[in-house]
Image (cartoon, grey):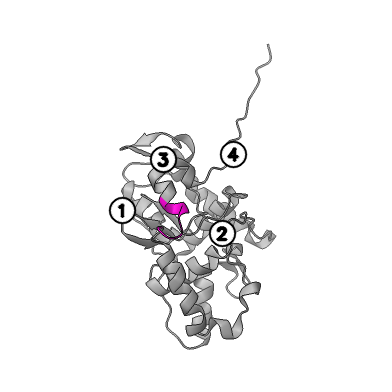
C-alpha cells in the first residue's frame, strides 16, 4: 500500500479572530479604540514635521514596508524610512517606540485600513525574507522554543485564558491593554523573546526587520487593521 502524505494548508487569520467579543468590539469602534489617539496625533505631525513638504499623502504606501533599500543594501521598515527623512533634515532619530514615531506610523497605516497586505516583490529582498523565516523557526531561550511553536502549532489554543493567535502583524502599531499604550511590532518581538527567556534584540535591529518582513509574507492577503487592540 502506498502511503499518502497530506499537507494541511492553514489560511492566515488576523489576530482579531482570536479576541474575545468585547476586545474585538473595542478595536472596531473608532470612537472607543484608544489607538486612534495616536492616529490623530500622527495626522497633526504629518505637516508639523515637514513630511507634507516632500511627500504627497496620496503617494505614500506605508504597507509596502519593510522593503529592500538600495542605500543600505538591506531591508528598511517604515520607522527606519521616516527616521532617514529626519536625518536628511538634520533632526535626531526617534526610537521605534517613541510616541511621535508610533503616531506617524499609525496614521499612515490607518489610511490603508481594510487594504490587503501585499509585500513588494523584489528578488533582492529574498535573502532577508529567508533570514526572517529562519528566525521564526529557530529555537531560543531557556524554554527552547521558537515563534512557530506558539503561532503555528498552538494557534487557537488557550494560554492563561487567552487564545494564542497566529502572530500576524496586520494590526500594528497596536494598542495593548496590558501595557496601556500603543506598541510597535519590534516591542512585541522583544516581549515574545523575553517570554521564552531569551535575550531580545534591540528595536530596529536587522533581525527584527527581517522577521517583520517574513511575517508580512506569511500574512499576505490579510486586511490592515491598524490600530488593532490586543490584550
**Residue 189 drawn above or below residue 146:** below
User: Which mark lies nearer to you, 2 or 3?
Assistant: 2
Helix, strand or loop at mark 2: loop
| Disc nearer the start of the sequence (3/1) | 3
| Residue 28 appearing in the image | yes
Q: Label 1: few (<14), some or many (≥20) within 10 Å?
A: few
State which region is magenta.
Answer: 26-32
User: Which mark lies nearer to you, 1 or 4?
Assistant: 1
| Separation (CA) of disc 4 from disc 3 | 15 Å
| Residue that badge 2 annotates | 113
- Where residue 149 appears, x then y in whole percent? 44, 39
Q: Nearer the viewer, residue 82 or 230?
A: 230
Q: Residue furthest bottom?
A: 90
| Disc nearer the start of the sequence (2/1) | 2
| Disc nearer the start of the sequence (2/3) | 2
Q: Quadrant of residue 228?
A: bottom left
- Where residue 60 appears, x then y in whole percent? 62, 71
| Residue that badge 1 annotates | 178
Q: Are discs 2 and 3 less than 8 Å apart at CB?
A: no
Q: Label 4: few (<14), some or many (≥20) within 10 Å?
A: few
Helix, strand or loop at mark 1: loop
| Separation (CA) of disc 1 from disc 4 | 28 Å
Helix, strand or loop at mark 3: loop
The label on residue 11 is 4
Viewed as shown, does residue 59 lie left or right of 107?
right
| Separation (CA) of disc 2 from disc 3 | 23 Å
Which residue is painted at 45% across and 41% down in the image? 18
| Disc nearer the start of the sequence (2/4) | 4
| Residue that badge 3 annotates | 164
| Separation (CA) of disc 3 from disc 1 | 15 Å
| Separation (CA) of disc 2 from disc 4 | 20 Å
Amino acid at each position: 500500500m502506498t502511503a499518502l502524505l497530506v499537507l494541511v494548508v492553514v489560511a492566515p487569520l488576523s489576530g482579531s479572530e482570536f479576541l474575545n467579543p468585547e476586545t474585538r468590539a473595542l478595536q472596531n469602534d473608532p470612537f472607543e479604540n484608544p489607538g486612534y489617539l495616536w492616529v490623530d496625533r500622527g495626522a497633526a505631525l504629518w505637516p508639523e514635521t515637514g513630511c507634507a513638504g516632500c511627500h504627497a499623502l496620496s503617494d505614500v504606501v506605508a504597507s509596502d514596508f519593510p522593503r529592500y533599500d538600495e542605500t543600505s543594501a538591506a531591508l528598511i521598515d517604515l520607522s527606519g524610512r521616516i527616521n532617514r527623512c529626519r536625518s536628511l533634515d538634520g533632526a535626531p532619530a526617534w526610537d521605534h517606540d517613541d510616541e511621535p514615531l508610533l503616531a506617524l506610523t499609525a496614521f499612515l497605516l490607518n489610511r490603508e485600513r481594510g487594504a490587503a497586505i501585499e509585500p513588494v516583490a523584489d528578488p533582492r529582498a529574498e535573502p532577508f525574507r529567508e533570514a526572517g523565516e529562519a528566525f521564526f523557526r529557530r529555537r531560543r531561550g531557556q524554554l527552547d522554543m521558537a515563534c512557530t511553536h506558539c503561532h503555528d502549532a498552538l494557534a487557537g489554543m488557550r494560554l492563561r485564558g487567552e487564545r494564542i493567535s497566529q502572530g500576524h502583524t496586520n494590526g500594528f502599531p497596536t494598542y495593548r491593554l496590558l501595557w496601556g499604550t500603543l506598541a510597535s511590532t519590534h516591542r512585541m518581538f522583544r516581549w515574545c523573546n523575553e517570554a521564552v527567556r531569551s535575550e531580545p534584540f534591540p528595536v530596529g535591529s536587522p533581525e527584527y526587520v527581517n522577521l517583520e518582513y517574513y511575517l508580512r509574507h506569511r500574512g499576505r492577503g490579510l486586511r490592515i487593521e491598524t490600530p488593532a487592540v490586543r490584550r
